[in-house]
Amino acid sequence: MSPLIIDTDPGVDDAFALALACAAPGVDLIGVTTVFGNVGLATTTRNALRVLALCGRDDVPVAAGAERPLVHPHQHRARHVHGTDGLSGRSGTLPERATGVAGVDAVSLLVSLLESAPSPVTVVAIGPLTNIALLLAAHPAVHGKIARLVVMGGALAGGNVTAAAEFNIWSDPEAARRVLVEESVPVTLVPMDLTTRCAVDGPWLDSLAAAGPRGAALVSLTAAYREHYARSLGRDGMVIHDAVAVAEAVKPGLLHTTAMPVDVDCGFGPGRGGVIADRRPARQPDDRREVDVALSADLDQVRAFLLSHLAD
Ligand code: BDR
Ligand code: CA
């Protein structure tokens, strides 16, 4: 079993991502850490616990992390996308978990899980990168225990919060820069350019709802989110960004990646939070680190993979 940790800000698509991590074969979800993002930290943490309860995973330790960005606080959350409770107003329909949060903060839990893991761990970050930046900055000794960091974030060709920036990176650009540019842990970046192309449609959601109680419960969390995406896509459907990133983590190679250096705009102009990927094919080699950016996939295969495991 490959050990997996998820750092998350649930969030409707985070809920799908957590459910996938619980259902995927060959994967051992050993911990979940939470961060501010789509809604405030108390709510993302409560939602993570409830989604894990829905999946029958009272055993997975959960710890709460950052409630604000590293350097520049802001009040922007994504309640207009995910609903005021982060789950389309439906979080109260989920079961409460018998086990509450661990008695430690997120970074401490990450360190202890990494230190005690028998083999290197895949870490999937599907919210702002604040917890991960703090971990990597303060605990270099555990870098070698991270097999791969899979990050949902960034927009190479137009963002969703601003013209340039995608929500997770924009929420804490300084943290994202630390993780994507300044550190050397192997990173696979799954930007919204690709996750958007993996959007699921009404029949996909109907199939999941019909598959059983867990699938039906997940689909019942989507009303507000689906309305947002119907407006943004111009058709019925929604983008489950975070589940696409977890799909790559549990089935490496499902997405096709290209190695390239990236930077994160930490200025205060219109580009703030943007990811600048150097895609020049004939650029001169230099000493910048490269991250693997997921740019393409067999889209139908990704959707089928998601449905088959979420409907399990
Ligand atoms: C990302 O932002 C959040 O709203 C989603 O949960 C996802 O992690 C997409 O831009
Ligand atoms: Ca998220």
Image (cartoon, helix red, strand yellow):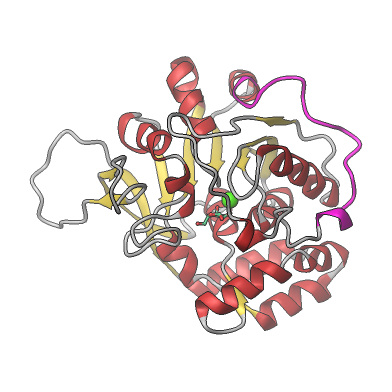
In magenta stretch: residue 30: no
Which quarter of the picture shows residue 223?
Answer: bottom right
Which quarter of the picture shows residue 72?
Answer: top left
Q: Position of residue 134 (x, y in %)?
A: 49, 25
At a point 47% along the width and 39% down the height, the residue shown is: 149
- The dominant secondary structure in magenta is loop
Q: Position of residue 116 (x, y in %)?
A: 64, 19
Q: Is residue 310 above or below residue 60?
A: below
Q: Nearer the viewer, residue 233 or 59?
A: 233
In magenta stretch: residue 106: yes
Residue 211 in sight here: yes
Side of 186 where 67 appears, left or right: right
Q: Position of residue 136 (x, y in %)?
A: 45, 24
Q: Is residue 56 above or below residue 88?
A: above
At a point 86% along the width and 68% down the height, the residue shown is: 212
Q: Is residue 146 above or below residue 276?
A: above
Which quarter of the picture shows residue 208?
Answer: bottom right
In the rendered image, the quadrant that contains the N terminus is: top right
> How many marks do you count on the picture?
0
Q: Position of residue 195 (x, y in %)?
A: 48, 64
In the rendered image, the quadrant that contains the C terminus is: bottom right
Residue 1 in sight here: no
Residue range (magenta): 91-108
Side of 224 where 271 appears, left or right: left
